[in-house]
Image: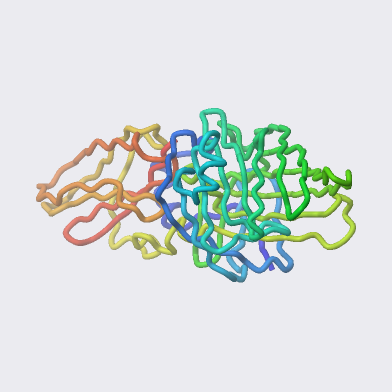
Amino acid sequence: MTNFNTKSIFAWLLCCAFSFGLAAQPTLDFAALSPTGTSFTIMTVNTDGINQGPAGSDLTWDFSDLESETAHTVTYLSPSAAPSSLAAEFSDDSNLAIRYEEYLPQGSIQVRYEFFNNTSAGLYQTGITNVGNVIVHYDNPLTVLSYPFEFVSTDSDNFSATYSSGTFNISRTGSISHEGDGTGDLLLPGGITVFDAVRVRSVIEFVDEIEESGITFNYTVERYTWYDESSLFPIFTIYTEQLDGSGSGAPITSAYYYQDFMDTDPIGLNEANDFDFALNTAPNPTTGLTNISYELNTPATTSLEVYGIDGRMVRTFTPTWQSAGTYNTALNLSDQPKGMYFVRLRVDGKDTYSTITLH
């Protein structure tokens, strides 16, 4: 069963809420991301009784009790690194490929490769291959997401492709619409928590026509995807396919989450701060430049570390002996993806934390 509540914040985050104020609207824009060479794990879940939850702002979507099923390794590639036949097919109009080491269920198909063109205007799917080695190449790509995109954004587009399945040649046409229908905190199995996620509701209408007979198959996909500002891959996806779009027959639903997005406790934040200590960052939110300030009542050895929400250490400052007084440290995160970051200040072996939101 999936539970939905009004927005809740961890106690440690409440303690520092006044230091960073009300966060600005999260905005999705992944044009600058070049993730080729990155591998991570996604996990499918049991979809019995799954419900996408409400639309709106300032929500908490609680999927923490979903039953995890199968792990899938995902790798970002240059299209030229795909098998030679696929590289020849997609290298001219694609700049990103995704390989699923274990076939990923999406409705009625099992996906092995997806191909995309990631541009300043948006992310476009140029092709897909499935378990039967069927290659669908879009001559008019399918818009996955236009940039920038945020809560209440909308867009729509058409797409088309031709492909072969067995002895049949198939012509595909369709339309896709997107709506940013929610924003809030996302709770997933294993203690994964994503703050300020943006939910995108997409409706995809497919019409596949067998050219030899003129027989057509219509089907509709309703897809809910939750994104964080720092991740091109959705953090959580619910994908429901309905044949003929008629509501007759049982729909096919699959769902999966980005298991590696955040460790259950990447840097010890589930533990209380070791002692009461003032640590501030300003401006916060920031577009890159911010200042970390703290005050020492007695001389001490201090160190500062900054982590991404996925547990990566992105900045570290050499431990230093400091006399009593107020200290300020300039921090530049302009080369990092948008999202939430954690600052850890260690004073004589005792830790305290704060957060930074990068826009």
Residue found at the far front of this picture: 167
Foreground residue among 83 and 124: 83
Taking the spot 74% from the left edge, 43% from the top edge, the residue there is 204
The number of discs equals: 0
Image quarter for residue 202?
top right
Taking the spot 67% from the left edge, 55% from the top edge, the residue there is 238
Taking the spot 32% from the left edge, 35% from the top edge, the residue there is 290
Answer left or right for 52 relative to 85. right
Answer left or right for 232 relative to 243. left
Q: Position of residue 349 (x, y in %)?
A: 19, 61
Taking the spot 66% from the left edge, 63% from the top edge, the residue there is 3
The colour scheme used here is rainbow
Residue 30 appears in the picture as rendered: yes
Residue found at the far top of this picture: 121
Q: Position of residue 62 (x, y in %)?
A: 61, 60
Q: Position of residue 237 (x, y in %)?
A: 62, 54
Foreground residue among 279 and 173: 173
Residue 152 appears in the picture as rendered: no
Is the C terminus in the top left, top right, bottom left or bottom right quadrant? top left
Q: Position of residue 57 (x, y in %)?
A: 63, 43
In the depicted structure, whether residue 277 falls above or below residue 25: below
Is the N terminus in the top left, top right, bottom left or bottom right quadrant? bottom right
In the depicted structure, whether residue 150 falls above or below residue 163: above
